[in-house]
C-alpha cells in the first residue's frame, strides 16, 4: 500500500518511523517548512522518501506533487493546516487520522491501523 504521511513535530516523526519499521511503503511526506517539520524531513531524506514542505497544503503545486505520488492512503499525524478535500479524495483508501491519545506506544497502533485498513474494501 502506497502511503503518504502528512504531519509534523515529534509525533509525526514517530509515526513515520513506525511505518518504516513496519515495512510500509511510504512514498512521500508533507510537513511545514518551519522547525516543526524538520524531524520528518531528516528521516525522509535518510530513507530516500520524497518530502515536501509547503507553506500551505492548499498551494496549487502541492496538489500536483501529491497526485504524482499516487497514494493509496494518507496518514495524518498532528496536522494543523487545513487539508483540501481534493487532496483527501485522491487516495482510494482515504485519509487516516492518527490521534496522540490513541498512541501511547506508537508502533502497535500503527500496525493495528494498517491491518484495519487492509480489511476495509476500497471506496468507489
Image: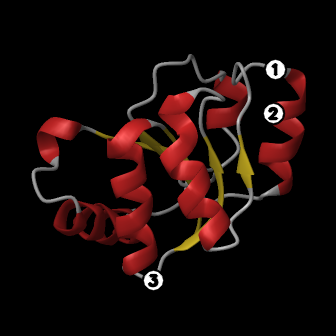
For the residues labelled 3 and 1, say whether their Cβ atoms are less than 8 Å apart. no
Answer with the quarter of the image where residue 18 lies: bottom left
Q: Give the secondary structure at mark 3.
A: loop
Q: Residue at x 85, y 45 (%)?
A: 65
- Can the viewer see residue 94? no
Query: In terms of secondary structure, where does tag 1 sit?
Result: loop
**What residue is rendered at 45% in x and 83% in y?**
23
Judging depth in this view, the residue of 113 and 92 nearest the camera is 113
Residue 64 image-quadrant placement: top right
Q: Which residue is identified by label 1? A: 59
Up/down of 74 relative to 46, above or below: above
From the viewer's perspective, tell me whether residue 87 is left or right of residue 46: right
**Quarter residue 119 falls in:** bottom left
The kind of secondary structure element at disc 2 is: helix
Alpha carbon distance from label 2 to label 3: 26 Å
Question: Mark 2 or 3 closer to N-term?
Answer: 3
Tags 2 and 1 touching, CB below 8 Å: yes
For the N terminus, the quadrant is: bottom right
Judge from the rendering whether residue 32 lies leftward or rightward of residue 113; answer left or right. right
Residue density around tag 1, few if under 14, some if 14–19, many if 20 or more, within 10 Å: few
Q: How is the image coloured?
A: secondary structure
Residue 92, position as x, y percentages in the image:
62, 54
Q: Residue at x 41, y 51 (%)?
A: 13
First of labels 3, 1 by sequence position: 3
Q: Which residue is mark 3?
A: 23
- Using a 10 Å C-alpha cutoff, classify the residue at mark 3 as few (fewer than 14 neighbours), some (14 to 19) or many (20 or more): few
Amino acid at each position: 500500500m502506497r502511503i503518504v504521511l502528512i504531519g509534523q513535530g515529534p509525533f509525526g516523526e514517530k509515526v513515520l518511523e513506525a511505518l518504516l519499521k513496519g515495512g510500509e511503503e511510504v512514498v512521500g511526506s508533507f510537513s511545514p517548512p518551519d522547525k516543526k517539520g524538520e524531524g520528518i524531513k531528516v528521516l525522509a531524506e535518510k530513507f530516500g522518501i520524497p518530502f515536501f514542505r509547503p507553506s500551505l497544503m492548499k498551494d496549487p503545486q502541492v496538489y500536483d506533487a501529491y497526485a504524482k505520488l499516487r497514494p493509496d492512503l494518507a496518514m495524518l499525524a498532528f496536522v494543523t493546516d487545513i487539508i483540501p478535500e481534493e487532496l483527501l479524495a485522491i487516495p482510494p483508501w482515504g485519509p487516516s487520522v492518527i490521534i496522540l491519545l490513541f498512541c501511547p506506544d506508537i508502533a502497535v497502533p500503527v500496525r493495528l491501523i494498517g491491518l484495519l485498513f487492509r480489511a476495509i474494501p476500497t471506496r468507489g
